[in-house]
Image (tube, rainbow, N blue to C red):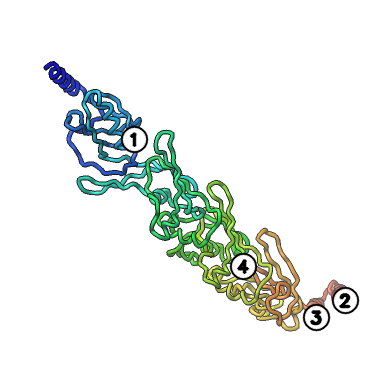
Amino acid sequence: MKSLTLSTLRRSLLAIALVISSPQTNLAQSPTPTISINSDYYLGGGDNIRVDIYDMPQFSGEYQIPAGGAIQIPIIGKVSLGGLTLEEASQTISRAYAHIIKKPLVTITLQAARPLNIWLSGEVSRPGSYLLPLATGGGTRPSVQFPTLPQALEKAGGIRTSADIRRVIIRRRLKANQEVTLTYNLLNYLQTGQTPQDITLRDGDQIWVPPQEKINLAEINQVSESNFSLPADQPRTVSVLGEVKHPGRYVAIGGDTRNGERTVGQPTIVRALQLAGGITPIADIRKIQLQRYTRSGRQQIITINLWQYLQERDSSQDTILQEGDSIFVPTATTINPAEVSILANSSFAPATVQVSIVGEVNAPGTLKLAPNTTLNQAIMSAGGFKPSRANSRVVELIRLNPNGTIYRSQVAIDFNQGINDQINPLIQDNDIIVVRRSAVAIWTDNINTALTPATNLVGAILIPTRFIELLRLLGN
């Protein structure tokens, strides 16, 4: 009888304490739908949970876990649940009530999950911290879907073309002073649609996307089609230098930009060359250098072979550009005449080059000619040499170099000569060809000048002097 009295007294005291206790974290007394979740979910600030104690509804209720991770429960007071799984949290509250309730049966369910705070670094478009919400399904007991690794990469603006998605690394904190490092091969995921690992994320995950150690152009193009790569329509500022018509910095966009139109496509090497006015006739398209920097500042040098792109239809050579890329088109050491026409008709060659021809030709002036035009062909396009007046043995070629210097050379003329760097070079944009007078024409012009009607004495005096000058010229 005495034992019964003590038990009744204890229950009465608990009921009185429950009435006067009013924890601020208690949200509601009526049950709400719960969320089924993986066993490796760790509670943290922002989670909404429900605590149910079997046969003790007065101790049950809903709570939102604050930033510190501890909630206030009736009678017991503060209990820390941060970093615990639902099962571990249930055991913690059971132990707290064990000295008051005999064998308490505690169940904790997740009502609403907090968004995950994820950190991304390395070869992504916008490194930083991101909040990723958990997706919930329908029904009375909706399940939770954690955000995936590809979704996080997409949230960060996509990966850069310098990224190595074969070994994306996630550092995950399990509990205090416990961390695990996971490595993911997203390329395998793209190629097969399967992954041997769970690619879902957890709160606090740190994602690092490393740069490629060995460049694979085919993989770059393949990965560019994924939903976690840079958007195709995202402009990229690049520099184009060397043997192009207009070296400089350009904003590359997808599509055929040669005509100022924007169509579907990725910003590629060919797009950039089109923006720079196209290659010059002496460009070496087999050894184009693409210079790229990773987030860590490491330089990557990629050799592009556009001849392979033209002849073997290797589209991987027309690689996709990245913000800040530099493209250098070197000068060819030799010109293969058989390749000139092919290059001139390529999409990355200029439609025309502008050449000025002055002097003793039948139609001097500025001409727009095909980019595969030689010096001999340019002279013929200007009507050819004027008979008996032009110096048909040698012409002067004047060329403005990209560095601002002027190149002048005397070129011997042989109309039977094919493309030759010394005798019949390919013309370049803004070249000037000067066809000078022959010695006979010079002598004739000076005679005519000397014999121009002159009645004054000065003219008579100058005639012997001009003859002396002509004799000196003829002697030379």
Among the two numbered marks 3 and 4 on one chain, the one whose residue lies closer to the N terminus = 4
The residues bearing labels 4 and 2 have C-alpha atoms spaced at a distance of 42 Å
User: What's the distance in space between the residues labelled 2 and 1, CA to CA?
Assistant: 105 Å
Residue on which disc 1 sits: 84
Which of the two discs, 2 and 1, labels the residue nearer the N terminus?
1
Among the two numbered marks 3 and 1 on one chain, the one whose residue lies closer to the N terminus = 1
Q: Amino acid at mark 3?
A: Val
Between 281 and 139, the residue placed more toward the observer is 139
In the displayed structure image, the side of residue 326 where residue 221 appears, left or right: left
Which residue is more in the foreground, 271 or 155? Answer: 155
Q: CA distance from mark 1 to mark 4?
A: 67 Å
Q: Say which amino acid is labelled 1.
A: Leu
Relative to 167, residue 85 above or below: above
Q: Which mark is residue 280?
A: 4
Q: Mark 3 and 4 residues: CB-CB less than 8 Å, in contact?
A: no
Vertical side of 245 occupied by 146: above or below: above
User: Mark 3 near mark 2, Cβ–Cβ under 8 Å?
Assistant: no
Q: Is residue 425 left or right of residue 40?
A: right
Distance (Cα) linking label 3 and label 1: 103 Å
Identity of the residue furthest to the left in this view: 1
Residue wearing tag 3: 440
Q: Percent from the top left, x then y, of residue 322? A: 51, 55
